[in-house]
Amino acid sequence: MPPQYVSEHKLGSVALMFPGQGSQFAGMAKDLISESSKAREILERADDCAGYFLSKVMGGEPPGELDCTRHTQPAIFVHSVALLEEFRSTYSVSPVVAAGHSLGEYSALYAAGVLDFESALRIILVRARGMEEAQPPSTCGMAAIIGMSKERTLELVETCRGSDVLEIANFNAPDQMVISGHMKTVHRAVEAVRKEKRTRAVVLNVSSAFHTRLMEPSLEALRRELGQVSFGQAVYPVVANLDAQTYPSVESEIKERLVNQVVHPVLWEDCVKTMMNRGAKTFIEIGPGKVLAGLLRRIERAATAINVSDLQSLRSLQGTHG
């Protein structure tokens, strides 16, 4: 069956969004493995590239391994790519722009033709291991702060930091930020939030303090791996987390942005606004979970969010929007 045309005249101008760490779920590749030959081929390539059975981890074996950062990041990327290729084989859509949240930026660069699959996965494997090992286990963490303004969250961070590291890692939406740093300061901030009205704090299931200066030990290996990769020209713009601007075409500048992204906050709210300024009307989230679709509703209620997180949601797109 040829791809079905569901672009501008049915969906409006399309932006692609790709999720990052935290969107994984146990057994997230089971339907891909059992129902899609295209996805199985992608997972086989991933296993060969990774040098171990990443596909088994994505299928839920052994239990708990998926939540280790060294597995989580490559698993989310591979899952996103497999769903993207299924989407492309079913629908003919010409995106106007793309972006990914943290790790998801690599999925966006793959989608736009800047990185090939194996090159992106090799970079992610190095990135994931470096970020996991950057600080001793159980010494650092992250928490989502929901219902608090950006200004009040910045005040909270200043008040609770003390002599340790505590920073805003993700500016996700007007009333949703993620703080990151030494574990005792994160817990101190969470307790302070719980005393505020109409706000809540959720400690995240992550292994370290991502998007802070505490990730600096991971940068050398990442920069070295990036130096071995050739980057192509984007077929449509990709918005960078670092500054919410579209990626430049100069290869050295792309690589430097990807390095700096690890130790700087994700400006996701601004990334969405940049995509909207480029004409995006319909935002299609491709990959595990529905985190970005939820954030979109907090940023701009008028925008349309579509989620493709598994084969069932991909098939339902035809019935709803085809």
Image (cartoon, grey):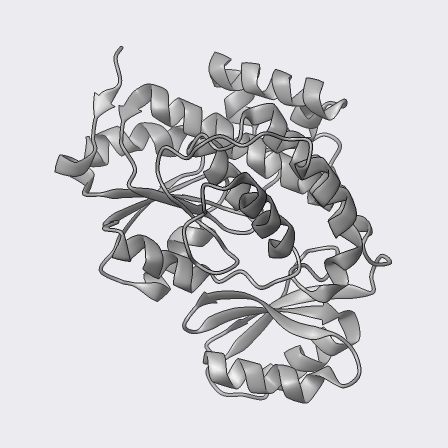
> Residue 2 in the image: x percent, y percent?
25, 13
Q: Is residue 148 visible?
A: no
- Horizontal placement of 163 versus 171: left or right? right
> Residue 208 in the image: x percent, y percent?
74, 58
Q: Residue at x 51, y 85 (%)?
A: 152
Q: Nearer the viewer, residue 14 or 206?
A: 14
Q: Is residue 196 visible?
A: yes
Q: Residue at x 63, y 81 (%)?
A: 157
Q: Nearer the viewer, residue 108 or 182?
A: 108
- Horizontal placement of 320 versus 42: left or right? left
> Residue 304 in the image: x percent, y percent?
25, 51
- Horizontal placement of 73 versus 218: left or right? left
Residue extending farthest right:
136
> Residue 94 in the image: x percent, y percent?
27, 32
Residue extending farthest left:
9
Instruction: From this view, report whether residue 138 is shown above or below residue 116.
Output: below
Instruction: From this view, report whether residue 118 is shown above or below residue 298.
Output: above
**Splitting the image into 4 quarters, where does residue 117 fall?**
top right
Q: Nearer the viewer, residue 144 or 174?
A: 174
Instruction: From this view, report whether residue 195 is shown above or below residue 263.
Output: below
Q: Residue at x 32, y 53 (%)?
A: 275
Quadrant for the C terminus in the image: top left
Quadrant for the N terminus in the image: top left
